[in-house]
Image: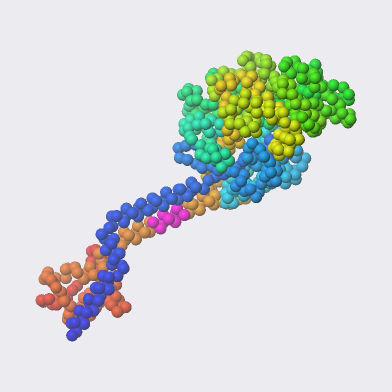
Amino acid sequence: MHTANAESTAARIHRAYDKGWWSGLQSLVKRNRVALTVLAALAILLLGYSAKALLASTPDYMLVIDSGSTGTRLYAYTWRERRGKLPLLEAVSIRAARHKLPRRAAGDRRAYERLETEPGLDHYVDDPQGLQQRALHPLLEWAEAVVPRQQWRQTPLFLFGTAGLRKLAPEAQERLMTHIQGALADSAFRFEPSWARVISGVDEGIFGWIALNYLTGHLAPHPLTAPKSPLTDEAVAAAADQLSSSGSASRVRAAEHGLETVGALDLGGSSLEVSFVPSERPAADAEVNVTIMGVQYSLYTYVHHHYGLNDAFDRSVTLLLTRPSHFGGSEAVQQGQPLRFGLGNSGGSPGGLGIAAQRHRAGPGRQVLEAAGPEWISDPDLPALHHPCLFEGYDKSYRRMDYNGVAPDPPVVRLLGRPDWDACAKLAAAVVNASAPCSKPPCALGTPQLATSNKFYALTGFFVVYHFFGLQPSAGLAELENAARQFCATPWPVINATRGREIHVDRYCFRVPYVTKLLREGLGVPESQIQIGSGREGWTLGAALAEGSRVGVGQGIDISKSQAGIQGWGWGLGRSLGWLIWICAAAFSAVWLGLLLYTTSWQTCSPGRLLNRKTYDSSPLSSPTLASAASVNVPIAAKVYHGGAPIPSGGYPGLLLANGPSRALSMPSDVDC
């Protein structure tokens, strides 16, 4: 009876242990230890890859403000690094935070979707409060809505003053830039005083050339296909490693390896920038070296000041006010006498006012200019002009532009529409003055034109004109002229009622003959080599790429060095959070792998295993039975439970192995498992 009870107790011990979860786990690990080890290692790699993908899905940001002549525009770009390739940038649509749009930007109809406040910053030279509240604050408020809060302090903010600020007198320009730097330093973003500056037209041309050639896949060593952009449903991807003005022996010259690029004809509101890699090396004073991904490009960049769309229209008004015999005369206005106006030299870089703009000699527009002299109305202080490029019924005052901080005299005139297509074309030809000579022919707008077989893209203003008439970039200039003729024959009240909300809608009858004259004759490039751009090749994209690369966007930014008094992790909260997740996941996987290995090594030490080992006697025990004559010594480490209590260290008394001669089962605690 006692023996039966002992047998029953021992059997329960074995069954309870063998059927437990721990025993099952040990058995599983024993059979599959290699496979489980490999799976654990793969899990660690998978978690690392997932963490990398998480970091890649959180882009950096870059903010660029364009301080133009008519308004101030903010562009936001996401920036993603790609191993072995140029970084990927995408423009953030203004619709990303529509509720933060300034009323003006929300209601205007433009060729470009852009965030803008008006007027330009040059109107706030002596109004720092207005500069901050009306010009910059609405833009920065929108930026705060689209850039994640945790990335504000690591997102660089640049402001570049262009034509509108270049026209200011030096003292006024310096005073305004001080106000701008103070306002941006108080913003939520990463900013340094040198990041707000006035740039030259050459800089604009270079930035535009960089963006264009990346978008078209002409930058070595990685021509890329651009992804879709939320702005145009086309690619706004781009890159520029870093601008450099000096060469290096380790750099590769693009020309030496036959790398083809395209030229840029960037028509802005104030100036026209021409940038391309010429067939022959330009003169040292006309060459600009740009290094991108170790490849050096020798650019020829020239700025034709006052050839932008807005300045060109202003010059047409000046020509109507000025008799050809008085070109280059005094700016003084005598009441009741013909007006005299001298264009002079605007200064700036390079060369000031384009040569052709200074040589309005008698030419195709002579009859128009002589017939369209000033006409006085009831107010003797305000001259009225019949403009051949304005609509029938048009009657508006027009404020003329300042040059070098000097206001024209008279500053305001009254423009009356007297539409005449042929006369308008002659006036536009006089503004272009394509026949102006230069020191070294062939000439383009009065400047030497280097030979090139490059394809050119006509950008910005050219695209705006095409877009206004709903034409595709592939449409020819003749098709553009036909569309304009029909449009300009419409009376002004009809145009104002149907398209009055569009910016500068009254000037397109001048713009069409002006741009066609530029492209056909003024620039010295065959029409067959010119392609109208798509509207996505903005110079601000090139600026974001070049400057962002220079200040370390996408490479980790130590914001504690650039923002005094700000404490933060080097890569920002978003990037640090990704690394924290990765570290925790890797630690968890490592613990799991260690547990598996530990379990694998310990499982052979189980009580069930020890009880079955035949180290206790040389006598065979084919069917051992338990008796109460001797005790089984079980090591402390083997915690076998019987009735809820562990077996004592001295063994469980009363258990004998009975099958032949009685032998005490001795199991030392240092069994080698």
Q: Tell me what residue is drawn at x 55 percent, y 20 percent.
A: 452
* Nearer to me, 639 or 539: 539
Number of numbered labels in the structure image: 0
**Rendering quarter of residue 464:** top right
Residue 164 x %, y %: 71, 33
Image quarter hosting the N terminus: bottom left
Residue displayed at 47% across by 33% down: 222
Q: Position of residue 412 (x, y in %)?
A: 81, 31
Q: Nearer the viewer, residue 574 or 114?
A: 114
User: How was this image coloured?
Assistant: rainbow
Drawn side of residue 455 relative to residue 109, left or right = left
Q: Main secondary structure of the magenta part?
A: helix
- Which image quadrant is residue 390 in? top right
Determine whether, in the image, residue 32 is placed left or right of residue 398.
left
Which part of the image, by quadrant, shows the C terminus? bottom left
Q: Is residue 361 above or below residue 577?
A: above
The reply to whether residue 630 is visible in this rendering is: no
Instruction: Tell me what residue is drawn at x 62 percent, y 48 percent.
Output: 97
Q: Residue at x 65, y 28 (%)?
A: 483
Q: Which portion, as a residue range, is magenta?
A: 581-589
Residue 238 appears at what percent x and percent y?
A: 53, 36
State whether residue 578 appears in this view: yes
Magenta residue check for 346: no
Residue 162 vs 528, above or below: the answer is: below
* Magenta-drawn stretch contains 586: yes
Q: Nearer the viewer, residue 452 or 136?
A: 452
